[in-house]
Amino acid sequence: MTLSLKGIRLSAGEFQLAVDAEFGGGVTGLYGVSGSGKSSVLEIIAGLRRPSAGSVELDGAVLTDAACGVHLPPERRGVGLVPQDGALFPHMSVEDNVRFAEGRTVGAGGLFERGRVCELLGIGGLMGRRPAGLSGGERQRVALARALVSGPRLLLLDEPLAALDPARKEAVLPYLRRIRDELRVPMLYVSHVPGEIAALCNEVAVMADGRLQRQGPVEEVFRQLRANYAEP
Amino acid sequence: MGDVLQVTLFTLGAAVLSTLSILPPGIALGWLLARRQWPGKSVVETVIALPLVIPPVATGLILFGRRGPLGSLFERYLGVEIVFTWKAVVLATAVMSLPLLVRTARVAFEEVPVRLENVARTLGAGPWRAFFAVSLPLARRGLLAGAVLAFARALGEFGATAMVAGMIPGETITLSLGIYRDIQLGQDSAAYTLLGISVVLAFAAVTIGERLSRRRPA
């Protein structure tokens, strides 16, 4: 998987986003403080926001190209999104949530058969429940399953553990690793917690003030950040 | 008694037809106002709200008088005579109830988190499926409340209806028009009978609406 963002520009009030980046397969962390532009980048990749300039390409296919007026709608991108709170549909059962995307996407499809995904995420016993009756961790696992059943070519995770207490975070992380190792779906994992990124990602891109500051292997980038922080 | 029954059934029928006829445009407008920015949005908002603020009699005159925009359009292009027919009652009540439905629908859609619609789109749902599977069911309670409000408004509409439908016995007389007519004729007891029926119908409509809108999704 190759995802490239070329000359992406976006203005929202005083906030200016200016990003050029290329992401490979595996799990890439997108690290930065709140307001650094991480979520805006995800929204642009998912097709939920149009940049004023620049292009987004996934495996050579143009998803967005502001100069040519190309903007593939979100449902035709094969890009899954899991927001912070899971965003489960509250009026549907867990099963209906998971089935929502079945057979409707342009992504890898067959790899992510519903039964397999539900087993992988350990949510088989929750099918008849309503989202309101689930714990935070269960909600996130259902949201992950729902996004995976859509057969995404790329999965965007927007601080999926941020709303969970430490114990629940620890409980969900192994499931994310299973998605990484068993389904091998490329992921872009947004977080402002270095520990989460270190536990899951092979590469990290650091964002600050709407710009990509550096990108590279997790250990190396965090070592540089620590060194910069320690400098007087 | 036959007259009372006829007037009651006619009023109910006209209110039901009127409410059903404004549901699709009312819900669509509510959604467009809640979710989209488009040129002329504020003008449309104002025009829709007009029946709430100008006298109903004036609304009737503006819209459905022979020289009014709707009346003349219907007559010229469809050859349909609206004024002083049952259709005038339905149209007048529809126009008078539409603002209530649109405003309630707008608030109902604004309360649906946008991120749920966004996630639906990333899960492969096109805009229509996202609307029917996510936005509409989640706005259901507010929409029901709006429909009940519109129905109750249609039941009690007087000014615009009187202006365009007249008071043709057996054809265009609604409960409100009947009450006015009976009072004018000095038939107070007949007027109070119709008044009682109006109160019961309005009470029932609001109670049913409340129950439906409070019911948890199955």
Image (cartoon, grey):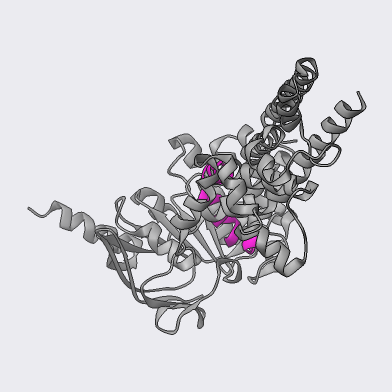
Q: Residue furthest left?
A: A232
- x 57%, y 71%: residue: A77
Direction from residue A68 to residue A99 in the image, left or right: right
Q: In the depicted view, which residue is nearer to us: B58 or B103?
A: B58
For the stretch drawn in magenta, the main secondary structure is helix
Magenta-colored stretch includes residue A40 = no
Q: Is residue B142 visible?
A: yes
Q: In the depicted view, which residue is nearer to us: A217 or A42?
A: A42
Image coordinates for residue B70, horizontal then vertical, percent: 64, 58
**Vertical relation: B53 (above or below) A143:** above
Q: Is residue A88 visible?
A: no
Q: Residue furthest top?
A: B189
Give the quadrant of residue B181. Answer: top right
- x 69%, y 55%: residue: A100
Give the quadrant of residue B6. Answer: top right
Q: In the depicted view, which residue is nearer to us: A102 or A180?
A: A102
**Vertical relation: B195 (above or below) B106:** above
Image coordinates for residue A201, horizontal then vertical, percent: 43, 59
Direction from residue B7 to residue A209 in the image, left or right: left
Image coordinates for residue B3, horizontal then vertical, percent: 88, 29
Image coordinates for residue B25, horizontal then vertical, percent: 65, 54
**Vertical relation: B145 (above or below) B185:** below
Q: In the depicted view, which residue is nearer to us: A143 or B92?
A: B92
Give the quadrant of residue A180. Answer: bottom right
Q: Residue furthest front?
A: B185
Magenta-colored stretch includes residue B108 = yes
Question: How many numbered tags mark residues here?
Answer: 0
Q: Please report the bounds of the magenta region as a residue range.
A: B103-128
Direction from residue B32 to residue A8 in the image, left or right: left
- x 44%, y 55%: residue: B42
